[in-house]
Image (tube, rainbow, N blue to C red):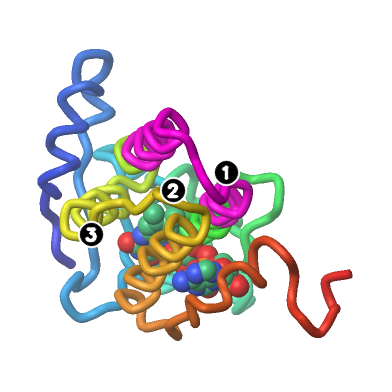
Amino acid sequence: MRVYLHHHQRLVSRHYLKSSLRALFWAKMESRKSLPFSRMVCAYTDNIRCRSCTSFAAWSAMAATKPAQTHSSSSIATDTSASSTRQTPATLPDDCPPDVEALGRASWTLLHSVTAAYPEKPSLSEQATAMNFVSSFGKLYPCNWCGEDFRRYMERNKVRVGSRDEFGRWMCEAHNEVNQKLGKNVFDCNKWGERWRTGWKDGRCG
Ligand code: FAD
């Protein structure tokens, strides 16, 4: 298992160190180079996981591979971060803090919905607000390495906010960048409006 400090985490930790040594970030990643990003596992120094940086499934799988703390049922794994006796469900319950995937789905819903509600002909002030929103989003996104990659993407691909369609397509392309990174299918950006604004032409969205 590789253990090292991610550059961004080092920066973030400066803030947390002021209040508590517990908050010094370190990444506990299993073969980051060979596993898909969704399988990365990230934790604080005291082994409390950074939930919004970690796939719940990956965390559970890692806990389940520790023989001394594995239960006989294949669907139950021990949460080693808190207590050796506490059982972790196979899937993340709805009323728990989001993992990287739940946070991502909710965030993309917000981001695409913002572009869907964006004016066709935005004023300069509306364009500035949109730019600020996306920029702040990238800085505050709770999965720090996701936010870092998103900010790098923005540096390479300037946010386009000149019209609703421009903004919607830019967001779709940004989402596709993450899809590709995770080995998922690329979405057809000609259809971003149907997916997020009007509903599909076949009428199934009502
Ligand atoms: P999602 O990718 O969340 O997509 C939700 C829905 O959006 C899909 O069902 C589909 O209908 C629609 N959709 C898909 N692609 C597009 C598109 N291009 N345009 C418009 N609509 C689309 N996870 C990681 O593991 N590592 C990361 O580095 C990472 N970075 C992220 C960065 C950002 C800014 C965000 C918001 C999320 C990031 N995530 C990351 C989370 C990841 O993108 C997914 O949200 C998560 O893996 C759940 O994926 P999903 O397959 O359920 O659908």
Placement of the N terminus among the 4 image quadrants: bottom left
Residue 167 magenta-highlighted: no
- Place residue 89 in its image quadrant: bottom right
The residue identified by callout 3 is 157
Placement of the C terminus among the 4 image quadrants: bottom right
Is mark 1 in CB contact (under 8 Å) with mark 2?
Answer: yes
| Mark 1 or mark 3, whichever is nearer to me | 3
Q: Position of residue 74 (x, y in %)?
A: 60, 79
Residue 5 visible in the shown view: yes
Helix, strand or loop at label 3? It is loop
Name the residue type under label 3: Asn
Q: Position of residue 20 (x, y in %)?
A: 26, 18
The residue identified by callout 2 is 52
Alpha carbons under labels 1 and 2: distance apart: 8 Å
| Mark 3 or mark 2, whichever is nearer to me | 3
Where does the magenta region start and end? 109-137
Helix, strand or loop at label 1? It is loop
Name the residue type under label 2: Ser
Residue 114 magenta-highlighted: yes
Q: Is residue 98 above or below residue 71?
A: above
Label 2 neighbour load within 10 Å: few <14, some 14-19, many 20+: many
Q: Position of residue 7 (x, y in %)?
A: 10, 46
